[in-house]
Image (tube, rainbow, N blue to C red):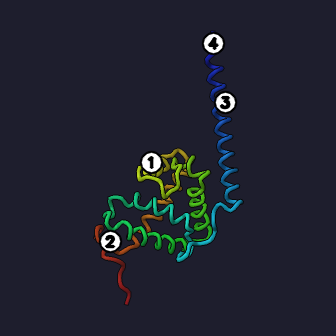
Amino acid sequence: MLNTTANVDVSRRGFLKLSATAAATLTVLSLSANLTGCSSEQASTGFLVLRQEDIVCLSALLPVLYSGAIPSAQMHSHVQAALTAIDQNLAHFSPSMRKLTLKLFNTLNNPLTRGPLTGVWSSWSQASSADIQQFLQRWHNSRFDLLKMGHNALLQLAMLAHYGQASAWQHCAYPGPPRLH
């Protein structure tokens, strides 16, 4: 007669070992990517903080986040304005918040961490809207607080940029900030 309890214990032990190994591997890969310069620290031309790979990532994410709120004919110009607004906002963040946000972008842009953490295995420029929606849902519903915080950070960056534009005020009946004399 087989002892199924022993088999379950071995299975659980094996799963825990695999999980610990995977977590350690992702940590080492992420650190090595940062140390070897896989992520540029130079802001893209015309930007204060955002790097080229951040712009590519956000250019893929923002249309999905703004879907339904922005007419498709206006999406490109709105995303361009949002990128500028996000860059301006990041430039005014505290150094520690800016650093954390750039670490989030490093994680999203690094191919070694992007695939396992987001489920988006291709580059952001090749990701479909469905892939991005699944990634956002995955992080929003994650049991890991760090991924939920990453989702919230992306959403807050996008919403801050959106509602900072006068074109977004009409649909929510906001007359705009008061004029100071």
Identify the element where label 2 is drawn: loop
Residue lying at the far bottom in this picture: please name it.
181
The residue under label 3 is 13
Q: At x 62% / y 51%, what residue is drawn?
A: 112
Q: Amino acid at mark 1?
A: Gln
Residue 108 placement: quadrant: bottom right
Crowd rating for badge 3 (residues with CA inside 10 Å; few <14, some 14–19, many 20+) = few
- Asked whether, in this view, residue 13 is left or right of residue 157, the answer is right
- In the image, residue 27 lies at what x, y percent? 67, 50
Q: Amino acid at mark 2?
A: Trp
The residue under label 1 is 134
Instruction: Tell me the distance, in whole angstroms, between the alpha carbons under discs 1 and 3.
Output: 30 Å
Instruction: Tell me the distance, in whole angstroms, between the alpha carbons under discs 2 and 3.
Output: 55 Å
- Asked whether, in this view, residue 125 is left or right of residue 76, the answer is right
Instruction: Tell me the distance, in whole angstroms, between the alpha carbons under discs 1 and 4.
Output: 41 Å
The residue under label 4 is 2
Residue 169 placement: quadrant: bottom left
